[in-house]
Amino acid sequence: MTILNIAAVDLGASSGRVMLASYSTENHKISLEEIHRFKNQFVSQNGHDCWDLAYLENEIVNGLRKISNSGRTLHSIGIDTWGVDYVLLDQNGEVVGPTYAYRDHRTDGVMQKVQAELGKEVIYRKTGIQFLTFNTLYQLKAMTDENPAWLSQVKDFVMIPDYLNYRLTGVINREYTNATTTQLVNVNIDSWDTALLDYLGLPASWFGRIRHPGHQVGLWENRVPVMSVASHDTASAVISAPLSDENAAYLCSGTWSLMGLDTTTPCTDEHAMNANITNEGGIDGHYRVLKNIMGLWLFNRLCTERDVTDIPALVKQAEAELPFQSLINPNAECFLNPSSMVEAIQQYCREHNQVIPKTTAQLARCIFDSLAMLYRKVALELAGLQGKPISALHIVGGGSQNAFLNQLCADLCGIDVFAGPVEASVLGNVGCQLMALDQIHNAAEFRQLVVKNFPLKQFKKRPHFMPASDFEEKWREFCALN
């Protein structure tokens, strides 16, 4: 029996892990082991929130060396991260300027300026990407307006995971799924939109050729293959989401919540644009037709500010609070990166004439109720796009462990919810590597393996979880906030 040892590097906005997957080529069993975990956080550079690339690279290498030093043969490596953020390189491969974090405020107001100059519908028809203030298009516009002197130094533009692959192998690869998050890729031809690059005044030579995942980028230390995986963490998570049928939706639940459909065609009509739906690239010729929701970022910030260490206890306390006393729009810009999340929530409730949550449990309940309401809203939008009701919702990622929020989601969306796997991004990363190693053929085959190796938990909808008239009133109140 042959065991393949596969390293999956999974970086999020608050932490990173080097995970080791062991895959049996005989019985197709997959096991995961956390080898190395490390924090990730913004660093301040000249008043801006930035990423510490040298630190991230060092921690990744530390994790890979732990595997090597354990005596196990490593068969391949893959890296996935968040989207939209990028690195500029000079002709020597050195970094030019800071590597800004997407929550940095330098893009405030830039999206509106670009929309006014190019036309919102024109941008959406080209890219199919949801309008978010931190999309790479607006980050680059802010850079060219503020730091034009950098332009003469730059030779290459790469996304964060492509940069980290470059540091491991010396080879530059532009991976498709992450590239599509930039709002610079033309969804109709799956390559950079030259008109948008011309608008920014940036040469097409910076951006190179986009390649789909599933191939070898290069070698780490001249011996271990580094594979091109679906390097946007959501793309990897969707690969491992065990969708029950073609009408099922997924919800990647973590710092961000991303709810969507796995489709073979993008949706860029006026209805999709007005609903602010995004069409990001997947694998096997599929698209991730989804919507970004601020997600558990709000809850994580609450726990940090209130020094909460027992998360399960707080969730139980929130569950005991009266429901729907306060509702917020989690996607409101005031929650993107406030100095105090508690004050931002309380101020929002004050401005909308709602009960102001004060205790930590009340604040948590407000967040959970509001997220579940937004999940319902997006589920209805997605059902409208596909012309059929959502048959089931598959919640994957770390947030799938929150049984209370899962049940709220089932109740409010009126559909059964299936939770798991927890390590969705890692597993999707591994799945892409197995495809590159010619062990499996496509995402559908890998999803079958995921279900066999990682059992799901079902949350059935409760049709009478609260009086219908009370719920309709709260639903109208929530819709008025959006």
Image (tube, rainbow, N blue to C red):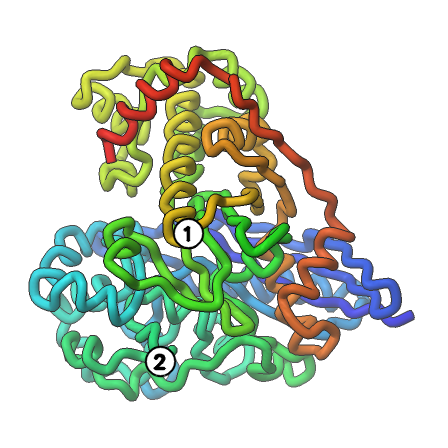
In this image, 445 relative to 180: left or right? right
Residue closest to the eye, 284 or 236: 284
Question: Compared with residue 201, is residue 450 higher up or lower down, i.e. above or below?
Answer: above
Q: Nearer the viewer, residue 192 or 21?
A: 192
Q: Residue furthest right?
A: 1
Disc 2 crowd rating (10 Å Cα; few below 14, some 14-19, many 20+) is few
Q: Secondary structure at mark 2?
A: loop
Q: Residue at x 50, y 32 (%)?
A: 414
- Determine the residue positioned at 56% across, 70% down: 229
Mark 2 belongs to which amino acid? Ile
Provide the residue designation for mark 1: 387
Can the viewer see residue 24 in this picture? yes
Residue 469: image location, x then y, percent: 37, 15
Of the pair 155 and 207, the residue shown nearer to us: 207
Residue 330 is left or right of residue 150, and the answer is: right
Residue 196 percent coordinates (x, y): 20, 75
Q: Of residues 18 and 399, which is closer to you in this image? A: 399
Location of residue 22 with respect to 419 vertically, above or below: below
Q: Quadrant of residue 295?
A: top left
Tag 2 residue: 189
**Image depth: mark 2 or mark 1 in front:** 1
Q: Which residue: 23% across, 31% down? A: 481
Image quadrant holding the N terminus, namely bottom right
Q: Kindly identify the amino acid type of the residue bearing the numbered disc 1.
A: Gly
Q: Classify residue 71 by image quadrant.
A: bottom right
